[in-house]
Image (cartoon, helix red, strand yellow):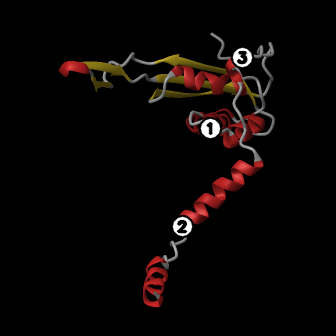
Amino acid sequence: MSTAVTERTEAVAHLKFARMGPRKLRRVADAIRGKTVREALVLLQFAGVFASEPLAKLLKSAVANAENNHDMSSDGLFITRITVDGGPGGGFTKRLDPRAQGRAAFKRKRLSHVTIAVGSQPPKKQPKQRSGAAISLKTRAQRQAQVAGKKKAASPKPATTRRKKTAAAGAGA
């Protein structure tokens, strides 16, 4: 019996029961498939898509697994595999939607399971470009408007002077 220790070439992270439909997650997953981890994190950070946040957290988890569990260097890691599968088809997340004449219809809230594998070698086959894989990056103007919106929401609104103006107009007449 030989106990040969094989070196792991991939580190894997799983996200189960994500409360998002698989089609929404696949669109982002197709965009980052085969890229380096650094490129993918930048893409996910500035993507204007709601589905990019859980994928970014999962990717960071896979990189942490590679560093801590498999003694891989975080520099030069590639996304070797990313799969998005459907979870239970609305088994326990059914919502009622009111319909005409007192009826009700079910809305099935979809769930997803995501698996990301990162490795030190790029994938053997380059992934083919898919039409739905486009995620738009926020432009510089959009990012500045978002930052300005946060600053505006944080500052208190100045008091309006409408009463003073109408009172002054009534006194002068």
Q: Which of marks 3 and 2 is nearer the N terminus?
A: 3
Q: Within 10 angstroms of label 3, few (less than 14), some, or many (20 or more) residues?
A: few
Q: Which of marks 3 and 1 is nearer the N terminus?
A: 1
Relative placement, left or right, of 23 versus 171 is right
Distance (Cα) linking label 2 and label 1: 27 Å
Q: Element type at marker 2?
A: helix
Please give the name of the residue rendered at 60% of the width and 21% of the height, measured from the top-left corner.
26
Relative placement, left or right, of 49 versus 142 is left
Q: Within 10 angstroms of label 1, few (less than 14), some, or many (20 or more) residues?
A: some
Residue that numbered label 1 is attached to: 56
Disc number lying in front (2 or 1):
2
Residue that numbered label 3 is attached to: 131
Q: Are marks 3 and 2 in contact (CB under 8 Å)?
A: no
Q: Earlier in the sequence, mark 2 or mark 1?
A: 1
Q: Where is residue 2 in the image (x, y as percent from the top left)?
A: 66, 12
Distance (Cα) linking label 3 and label 1: 22 Å
Please give the name of the residue rendered at 58% of the width and 39% of the height, measured from the top-left corner.
53
The numbered disc on residue 68 is: none
Distance (Cα) linking label 3 and label 2: 40 Å
Please give the name of the residue rendered at 48% of the width and 28% of the height, measured from the top-left corner.
20
Closer-to-camera residue (98/114):
98
Q: What residue type is labelled 3?
A: Ser
Q: Position of residue 11 (x, y in %)?
A: 65, 28
Q: What residue type is labelled 2?
A: Ala
Q: Decide: is 6 above or below 64.
A: above
Q: Element type at marker 1?
A: helix
Q: Where is residue 44 in the image (x, y as percent from the top left)?
A: 67, 38
Regarding residue 103, the answer to whether it shows in the image is no
